Image: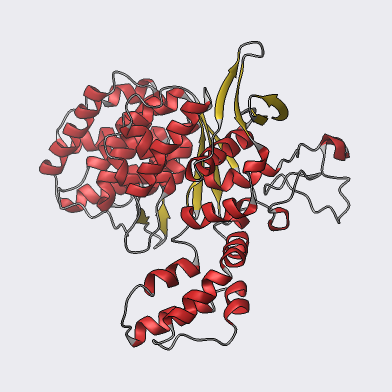
């Protein structure tokens, strides 16, 4: 929440009462640090609450836009032009690229009109940018899909407190009837408080098409430290070719690699550029413990081709299952059909065991795997494929009695004892990973082809 105060030379304080205020605090601190503006993190012993203290008149549109230009320099057309114009000579392709940027959006077209870069009027272009810099920054930032528009109502940029919150998913079209916006059709029940400091929320999010903010608000110092740590991880994961980053991968890999950095329940806010709302993920300590035991996260951060010629990026599904303590059976069964996905299936089974909390499964899995490899050496290739297909179909259709029957037939045919099968007879559902492991290993060894892109 935000309060007016009189404390030393500060007149405003904000507490991280929910994720919106926490994100605003993180964004404000970045803004203050860039502009070398004094602020104070203050703990009120009486209220048992921590606050960010600052002077309200230190927040100005000019300073805000200067910080936007610094923070999003790779996203602003005029900054790209300035960098390209740092050369003294220009090729035809470079001239073409600069002219494309001169008309890249509405404000650039308005400022430059029919003016073009011809390779010789460099200073004229730079002077025009300088003269209109604030307007260009403001309107580009306001309307670019992955900047302010991705988070807030574009009509509310720089506005003071509004009747409805400026954040997407919290905002309302005030011109429309709003009787149905609240609980039981009571519009007064709609939660949508707003402060001008919410304009600083975009600065707290990390990523581009899918961005996130970690609401690690045990203390404000901790909040800032955590997001700085993950900002470094996001920047380290930027693809140099397209300047994009897999934000979800950066988040979960960051949790895995930061052994003692986050070791408790934490709230993460996601914003997908294609959606007009924020998604809240509550990452429990149990889920964090599972993530930290994954030794090859990269295998899940790829797209895989299915037998139906569909490409699936399973990262979101796998992480959602971990967060919600849901087993990965349907993904395992989907990829069991394809011998080329053996390593992926093996890793999915490994995560499944962590989700189920099966502490004594490792040796039994080795037994199931060893049995499969003995079978592979003992029977013809066509029989291997036939039995694998039968087992896969039966387990997908949850005909577990049929799976057990086929395993007994295969044991007799290969003359190999399957010690693991007794666990399946006793409780198939609880020991299903043994069956998955056996079926997955029922293939000739060959070079792995993950079909990733």
Residue 88 percent across, percent down from the top left: 31, 79
Q: From where the camera sits, is residue 308 visible?
A: yes
Whether residue 387 appears in this view of the structure is: no
- From what the image shows, is residue 391 above or below residue 94? above
Mark count: 0
Question: Vertically, is 30 above or below 424?
Answer: below
Q: The C terminus lies in which quarter of the figure?
A: bottom left
What is the quadrant of residue 375 in the picture?
Answer: top left
Q: How is the image coloured?
A: secondary structure
At a point 65% along the width and 27% down the height, the residue shown is 17
Residue 208 falls left or right of residue 386: right
Q: Is residue 299 left or right of residue 264?
A: left
Q: Position of residue 146 (x, y in %)?
A: 54, 58
Q: Nearer the viewer, residue 444 or 46?
A: 46
Residue drawn at 35 percent across, 45 percent down: 300
Farthest residue to the front: give it.
Answer: 9
* Residue drawn at point x = 44 percent, y = 79 percent: 123
Residue 272 in picture, x, y percent from top left = 55, 51
In the figure, is residue 243 to the left or right of 31?
Answer: left
* Quadrant position of the N terminus in the picture: top right
- In the depicted view, which residue is nearer to us: 283 or 437? 283
Looking at the picture, how far across and down is residue 175, in whole percent?
86, 56
Which residue is depicted at the point 58% across and 35% down?
Answer: 25
Residue toward you, 217 or 450: 217
Q: Is residue 419 left or right of residue 224?
A: left
């Amino acid at each position: 929440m935000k309060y007016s105060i009189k404390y030393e030379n500060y007149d405003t304080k904000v507490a991280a009462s929910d994720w919106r205020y926490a994100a605003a605090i993180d964004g404000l601190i970045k803004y203050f640090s860039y502009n070398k503006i004094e602020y104070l993190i203050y703990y009120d012993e009486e209220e048992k609450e921590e606050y960010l203290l600052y002077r309200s008149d230190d927040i100005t549109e000019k300073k805000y836009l200067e910080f936007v230009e610094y923070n999003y320099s790779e996203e602003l057309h005029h900054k790209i032009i300035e960098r390209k114009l740092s050369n003294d000579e220009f090729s035809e392709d470079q001239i073409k690229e600069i002219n494309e940027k001169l008309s890249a959006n509405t404000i650039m077209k308005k400022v430059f009109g029919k003016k073009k870069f011809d390779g010789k009027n460099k200073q004229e272009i730079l002077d025009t940018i300088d003269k209109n810099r604030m307007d260009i920054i403001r309107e580009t930032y306001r309307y670019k899909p992955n900047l302010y528009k991705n988070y807030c109502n574009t009509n509310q940029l720089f506005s003071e407190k509004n009747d409805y919150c400026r954040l997407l998913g919290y905002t309302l079209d005030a011109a429309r009837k709003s009787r149905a916006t609240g609980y039981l059709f009571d519009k007064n029940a709609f939660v949508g408080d707003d402060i001008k400091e919410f304009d600083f929320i975009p600065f707290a999010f990390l990523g581009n098409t899918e961005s996130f903010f970690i609401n690690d608000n045990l203390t404000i110092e901790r909040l800032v430290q955590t997001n700085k740590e993950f900002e470094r991880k996001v920047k380290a994961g930027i693809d140099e070719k397209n300047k994009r980053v897999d934000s979800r991968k950066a988040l979960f890999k960051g949790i895995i690699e930061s052994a003692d950095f986050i070791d408790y329940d934490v709230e993460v806010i996601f914003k997908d550029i294609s959606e007009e709302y924020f998604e809240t993920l509550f990452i429990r300590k149990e889920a964090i413990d599972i993530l930290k035991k994954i030794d090859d996260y990269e295998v899940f951060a790829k797209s895989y081709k299915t037998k139906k010629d569909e490409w699936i990026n399973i990262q979101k599904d796998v992480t959602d299952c971990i967060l919600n303590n849901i087993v990965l059976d349907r993904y395992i069964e989907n990829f069991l059909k394809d011998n080329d996905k053996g390593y992926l299936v093996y890793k999915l089974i490994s995560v499944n065991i962590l989700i189920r909390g099966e502490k004594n499964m490792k040796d039994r899995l080795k037994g199931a795997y060893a049995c499969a490899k003995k079978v592979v050496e003992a029977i013809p290739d066509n029989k291997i494929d036939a039995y694998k297909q039968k087992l896969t179909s039966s387990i997908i259709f949850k005909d577990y009695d049929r799976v057990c029957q086929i395993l007994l037939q295969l044991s007799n045919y290969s003359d190999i004892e399957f010690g693991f099968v007794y666990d399946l007879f006793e409780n198939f559902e609880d020991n299903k990973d043994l069956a998955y492991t056996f079926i997955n290993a029922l293939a000739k060894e060959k070079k792995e082809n993950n079909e990733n892109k």
